[in-house]
Amino acid sequence: MSPLENVKALTFDLFGTVLDLGGSLTPAIQEFLDAKGSSISADEFWRQWRYRQRIEQYQDNIVMLGHSGYLPVARRACHYTLQLFGVDFTQDELSRLMEAWQELSPFPDVAEGLERLAKRYQLVALSNGEPEFLDHLAKNRVQWEFDRIISVQVAGAFKPHPGVYRRAAGLLGLEVGECLMVSANSFDVMGARMCGLRGAFVNRGDLPYEDSPYVPDVTCRDFLELADALVSPRVGE
């Protein structure tokens, strides 16, 4: 029997998996850079911002001085990136740029994919964001009522800290192997697999996977392919 036959809940990463970060944020970034007379492209800025954000999250986990929260870490990463590219700014200007995070939009395949997957699985958001921020995004931007929204704040650390995945399974009343982590971030799938969850790598960016024995059970390009793999036909049938 396929290990996916035991799966009862799909836990979804939001940032970069459900929500199109680059597509949502680069217009605001470009407007900001144009106003500053910067020659840096929004795409280049975003790539560095996103890269630095992940470093900030890992640092937040490692120093263990208390979980900072997603938006504060994203702000610190933006602060660093602005300095990296030599862009002058005030804290008020940085705050206005950060407001773009409230307007994130989902990828176009998300709504149909979630609708198909909901016919068979419990759908859960498992994200690095703060609870109130996640509630806003799910209700007003994704416009999908997840069966449950779990913030990493319940574990006090960012993914891929193992406590996040184990705590989520416990809150759902499930064994880790009954949960499948769905993420476009390979480190997220790897972290979940290390903890015994199943994993689906939604490779939206055509990126390589980690050099790790903890590989995804499913690799796909979007949620429609994920639904094809998990729902029609059912895995193992």
Image (spheres, rainbow, N blue to C red):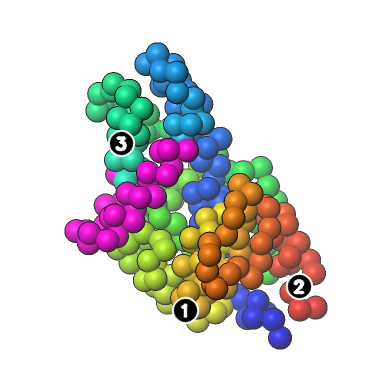
Q: Residues within 10 Å of mark 1 (few under 14, many from 20)?
A: few
User: Given this view, does label 3 or label 1 mark the residue nearer the observer?
Assistant: 3
> Does residue 193 appear anywhere in the picture?
yes
Query: Where residue 233 appears, x then y in whole percent?
Result: 80, 69
> The disc labelled 2 sits on which kind of residue?
Arg
Mark 3 and mark 1 lie on one chain; the one further toward the N terminus is 3
User: What separation in Å lies between label 1 and label 2 (alpha carbons)?
Assistant: 23 Å
Q: What residue sits 52% from the left and 55% below the top?
A: 185
The residue closer to the viewer here, 24 or 9, is 24
- Identify the mark at residue 232; answer none if there is no mark: none
Count up the numbered dots: 3
User: Given this view, does label 1 or label 2 mark the residue nearer the observer?
Assistant: 2
User: What separation in Å lies between label 3 and label 2 (alpha carbons)?
Assistant: 46 Å
Q: In which quarter of the image is the N terminus?
A: bottom right
> The disc labelled 3 sits on which kind of residue?
Tyr
Residue linked to disc 3: 80
Residue 48, image quadrant: top left
Left or right: 40 with respect to 109?
A: left
Q: What residue sits 34% from the left and 56% below the top?
A: 58
Image marks 3 and 2: residues in contact by CB distance under 8 Å: no
Query: Where residue 149 appears, x then y in whole percent?
Result: 46, 60
Q: Does the segment drawn in magenta span residue 67? A: yes
Residue linked to disc 2: 234
Q: Residues within 10 Å of mark 3 (few under 14, many from 20)?
A: some
Q: In this view, does 53 lie above or below 148?
A: above
